[in-house]
Amino acid sequence: MEIPTRDETARLADQLERSFRGGAWQGPALAELLDGLDAAAANRRPLAGGHTIHEIAGHVAFWLATTSRRIEAGAGSAEESAADWPQVDASEATWRTTLATLEAAHRRLHSLVAGLDDARLDDPVAGSDPTVRGLLLGILQHNAYHAGQMALLRPAAAEPPP
């Protein structure tokens, strides 16, 4: 009987936590960048035609949840592009809901990955990188990319335009 191993999945779960909560190599993590940000700042659009921090947070939540669904469903998972960039309103209540949704999506994925056996990493999933490993490496890159966007937007978003 083969004993399941979790060395690689434990490393991936740790990296997910770092990219979300802190201790990430690239700089501030998502939660660090969102901490203390109010709806007015999160919905400010300092770059014409660019996304707001609120829109980016909703987008990241969508992909964290989609990653969980794809791992759970395997290769038969369907693409869910309708909510990829969800429409948001500028209210404080909607901003708080987006933050709660983001937190829940991260917790679900982190828990799922922490419970996986390493043997599952080569299982097929839907999407551009057809394995669980590829999907998880991709979501880590996605988190880092959007954390970088938020890090650039946050100083401009925190101050109302003149």
Image (cartoon, rainbow, N blue to C red):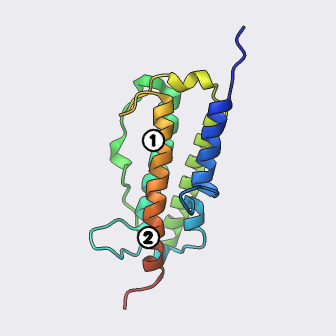
Please provide percent x and percent y for residue 73: 48, 27
Q: Is residue 16 above or below residue 40?
A: above
Q: Is residue 69 left or right of residue 86?
A: right
**Residue at the location (36% across, 59% down)?**
87
Q: CA distance from mark 1 to mark 2?
A: 21 Å
**Residue at the location (62% across, 33% down)?**
9
- Mark 2 Cα within 10 Å, few/some/many (few <14, many 20+)? few
Which badge, 1 or 2, is on the more N-terminal residue? 1
Q: Is residue 80 left or right of residue 20?
A: left
Image quadrant where residue 14 sits: top right
Q: Nearer the viewer, residue 156 or 36?
A: 156
Q: Assign a secondary structure to mark 1.
A: helix
Q: Residue furthest top?
A: 1
Q: Assign a secondary structure to mark 2.
A: helix
**Residue at the location (58% across, 41% down)?**
109
Amino acid type, mark 2: Leu
Q: Nearer the viewer, residue 59 or 155?
A: 155
Disc number placed over residue 152 in the picture, else none: 2
Please provide percent x and percent y for residue 37: 55, 73
Please provide percent x and percent y for residue 91: 47, 72
Disc number placed over residue 85 in the picture, else none: none
Q: Residue furthest left?
A: 49
Amino acid type, mark 1: Gly
**Which quadrant is home to the C terminus?**
bottom left
**Residue at the location (45% across, 49% down)?**
142
Disc number placed over residue 138 in the picture, else none: 1
Q: Is residue 80 above or below residue 124?
A: below
Q: Nearer the viewer, residue 20 or 25?
A: 25
Q: Residue furthest bottom?
A: 162
Please provide percent x and percent y for residue 120: 57, 23
